[in-house]
């Protein structure tokens, strides 16, 4: 596939080489951003497709890895019954919401996950010399289509658990909207935590271990009801390492496991605030970027 | 060249960059102590560098490895923020208005490609055209002109990862010019290239500067690049600017001797390096040829009886080649003469040693 260069009118002769000054763009800056995003994203997909076996292999492995976790947890719950008041279908829905949030993050923010490479190799230089925000270019150049398995797993589990919960009356009417909102909050929190962790890389360069601590471990832990953890750890997962705030907190109220209606409001306030704070950290970190020697 | 005398294209004023680095101690225990104690030290990469580059100038920026060249270029292009001092490119601060500056500059890093590694070369051009909002007419004109000049046609459909270094560099330079930048920063664009590829890149850069008036700042370790391309050169060492001026002044300021190589059919006996000539053959001065020249016509710098050759060094400001040749009759029967002026390489080496 080739990129099509958009038709525009030239107004003045070129002062330099090749291109010339042009009329005011027909599309707004947002429209241009969408187009550039699409071009960069499709280039990244075409790049990945060059290594077909690796692409298919990694997609397959991630699908299998996720599926075996589901089967294991399912088998345990089947054998031992409800945990702290959460039935197997309740847990499946929480798992599904958490995985869909993570899946959306992995799909659109895959490069944050592998940001260490940009710091270690100095590849971040190439983002800074382009006339676009670095975060925009970074995300657009690495769409995680091979990570689609996470989103697919979440959707599959939700498709299994949803009708059962509806049949027992555990979810009804507006609850579906709140569940979708929980997916969005969850994805936003993944983005905020992933972005903040990556931004720390501007100072410490190597962030792989930090990612395990802020992303990987909390991601696994918060895919299940936080009631199984001691209260101090529960608080950690909704404040300092807040991935539980987007999924567990609203679902606890939706599925009638406790909490109040305010549990639907907190994520709506906290998630955008977390993203805002993470963007601030990113901006500050960018000025501290030290590049690498040649 | 065009537009010299207009508002400066690039200004650096008291530019300084200090890196804070961890103090590494040897061994595992040293690493543990470093992690726990967090001891750091400051490394001054660029130390109060000031210069201005006029529109349309072609300036060489040279110095040894680690002198601060790349750090300066990275501050000029908005990659690094200066610790102190001020940078302006076309009147804008790269640190504060990075995206606007990026639209007006082109950057090439010889050691790091900016093309999409796994895609055909032409895809990179098309992606960049979209990123810089280059219209189809301009894009077509760019491709028409640059495909010929840089010989891109032969590998446009080849993935970047399969290009030779020379092809990749040509593609990188073309990619940096796709949006008609007014200023071009080139960080070692000829590194690792063979003689033919270097010549092609130099020819192209000359055209870009001369025909399109693009201001160019070039860092390189190849003094031929500087000699062939730049009318002005800046030398940096240990983060400080040591020289800023034209090539002639740089070479003249060094005052390095001219070398005359004589091939003789018969050689006088007893010639040794270090002897001086002042009409008559003198004793060995025991001093370096440069100093020996102060009180003599010329000095012998090398003698080879088997090849029957003698090298003489002399200062053009004090004497002429004809005078030296006349005096050289004492050395034997001269069969052939070649002259070699001190080049940029020797001059810069001399400057850095000073």
Image (cartoon, rainbow, N blue to C red):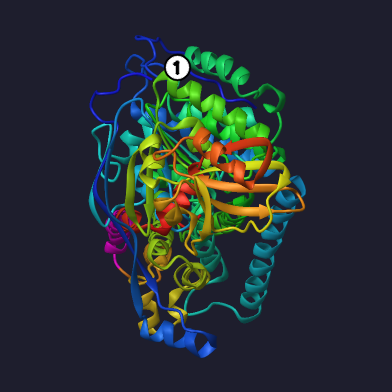
Quarter containing the C terminus of chain B: bottom left
Q: Residue at x 31, y 26 (%)?
A: B55
Q: Residue at x 47, y 35 (%)?
A: B320
Left or right of B302 in this view: B43: left
Whether residue A126 is in magenta: the answer is: no
Read off the residue under disc 1.
B211
Residue B235 can be seen in this image: yes
What chain does badge 1 belong to? B
- Which corner quadrant of the image does residue B100 belong to? top left
Residue B111 can be seen in this image: no
Left or right of B44 in this view: B310: right
Magenta stretch? Answer: A260-280
Q: Residues within 10 Å of mark 1 (few under 14, many from 20)?
A: some
Please say if B114 is above or below B348.
Answer: above
Residue A71, percent from left and from top: 68, 68
Quarter containing the N terminus of chain B: top left
Q: Residue at x 65, y 27 (%)?
A: A1
Q: Residue at x 58, y 49 (%)?
A: A144
Left or right of B108 in this view: B72: left
Q: Nearer the viewer, residue A276 or B341?
A: B341
For the residue labelled by badge 1, is the local secondary structure a helix, a strand or a loop?
A: helix
Q: Nearer the viewer, residue B305 or A126?
A: B305
Please say if A237 is above or below B192.
Answer: below
Residue A35, percent from left and from top: 46, 29
């Amino acid at each position: 596939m080739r990129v099509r260069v958009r038709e525009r009118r030239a107004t003045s002769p070129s002062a330099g080489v090749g291109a010339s000054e042009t009329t005011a763009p027909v599309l707004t800056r947002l429209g241009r951003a969408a187009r550039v995003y699409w071009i960069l994203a499709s280039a990244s997909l075409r790049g990945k497709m060059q290594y077909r076996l690796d692409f298919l292999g990694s997609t397959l492995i991630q699908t299998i890895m996720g599926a075996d976790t589901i089967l294991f947890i399912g088998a345990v719950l089947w054998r031992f019954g409800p945990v702290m008041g959460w039935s197997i279908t309740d847990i499946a829905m929480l798992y599904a919401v958490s995985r869909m949030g993570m899946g959306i993050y992995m799909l659109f923010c895959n490069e944050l996950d592998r940001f260490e490479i940009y710091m270690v190799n100095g590849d971040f230089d190439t983002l800074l010399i382009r006339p676009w925000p670095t975060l925009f270019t970074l995300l657009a150049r690495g769409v995680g289509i091979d990570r689609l398995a996470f989103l697919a797993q979440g959707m599959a589990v939700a498709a299994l658990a949803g009708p059962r919960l509806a049949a027992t009356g555990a979810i009804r009417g507006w609850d579906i909207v709140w569940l979708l909102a929980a997916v969005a909050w969850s994805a936003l929190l993944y983005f905020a935590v992933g972005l903040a962790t990556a931004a720390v890389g501007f100072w410490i360069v190597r962030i792989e271990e930090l990612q395990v601590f802020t992303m990987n471990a909390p991601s696994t832990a918060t895919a299940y009801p936080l009631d199984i953890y001691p209260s101090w750890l529960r608080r950690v997962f909704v404040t300092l390492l807040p991935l539980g705030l987007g999924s567990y907190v609203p679902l606890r109220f939706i599925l009638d496991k406790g909490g109040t209606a305010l549990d639907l409001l907190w994520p709506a306030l906290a998630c955008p605030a977390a993203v805002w704070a993470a963007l601030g950290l990113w901006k500050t970190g960018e000025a501290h970027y030290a590049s690498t020697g040649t | 060249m065009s537009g010299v005398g207009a508002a400066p294209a690039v200004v650096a004023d008291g530019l300084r960059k200090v890196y804070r680095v961890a103090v590494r101690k040897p061994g595992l225990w040293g690493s543990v102590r470093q992690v726990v104690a967090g001891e750091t030290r400051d490394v001054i990469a660029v130390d109060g560098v000031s210069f201005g580059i006029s529109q349309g100038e072609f300036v060489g920026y040279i110095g040894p490895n680690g002198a601060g060249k790349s750090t300066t270029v990275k501050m000029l292009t908005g990659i690094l923020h200066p610790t102190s001092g001020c940078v302006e490119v076309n009147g804008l601060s790269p640190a504060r208005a990075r995206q606007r500056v990026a639209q007006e500059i082109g950057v090439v890093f010889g050691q790091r490609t900016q093309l999409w590694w796994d895609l055909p070369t032409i895809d990179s051009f098309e992606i960049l055209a979209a990123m810089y909002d280059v219209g189809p007419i301009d894009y077509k004109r760019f491709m028409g002109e640059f495909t010929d000049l840089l010989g891109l046609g032969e590998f446009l459909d080849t993935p970047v990862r399969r290009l030779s270094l020379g092809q990749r560099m040509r593609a990188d330079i073309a990619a940096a010019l796709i949006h008609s930048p007014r200023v071009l920063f080139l960080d070692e664009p000829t590194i690792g290239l063979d003689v033919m590829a270097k010549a092609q890149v130099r020819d192209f850069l000359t055209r870009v500067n001369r025909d399109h008036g693009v201001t160019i700042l070039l860092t390189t370790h190849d003094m031929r690049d500087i000699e062939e391309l730049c009318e002005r050169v800046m030398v940096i060492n240990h983060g400080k600017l040591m020289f800023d001026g034209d090539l002639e002044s740089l070479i003249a300021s060094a005052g390095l001797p001219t070398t005359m190589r004589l091939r003789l059919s018969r050689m006088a006996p007893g010639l040794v390096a270090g002897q001086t000539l002042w009409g008559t053959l003198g004793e060995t001065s025991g001093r370096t040829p440069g100093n020996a020249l102060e009180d003599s016509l010329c000095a012998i710098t090398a003698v080879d009886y088997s090849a029957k050759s003698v090298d003489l060094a002399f200062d053009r400001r004090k004497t002429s080649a004809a005078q030296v040749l006349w005096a050289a009759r004492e050395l034997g029967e001269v069969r052939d003469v070649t002259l070699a002026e001190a080049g940029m390489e020797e001059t810069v080496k001399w400057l850095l040693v000073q």
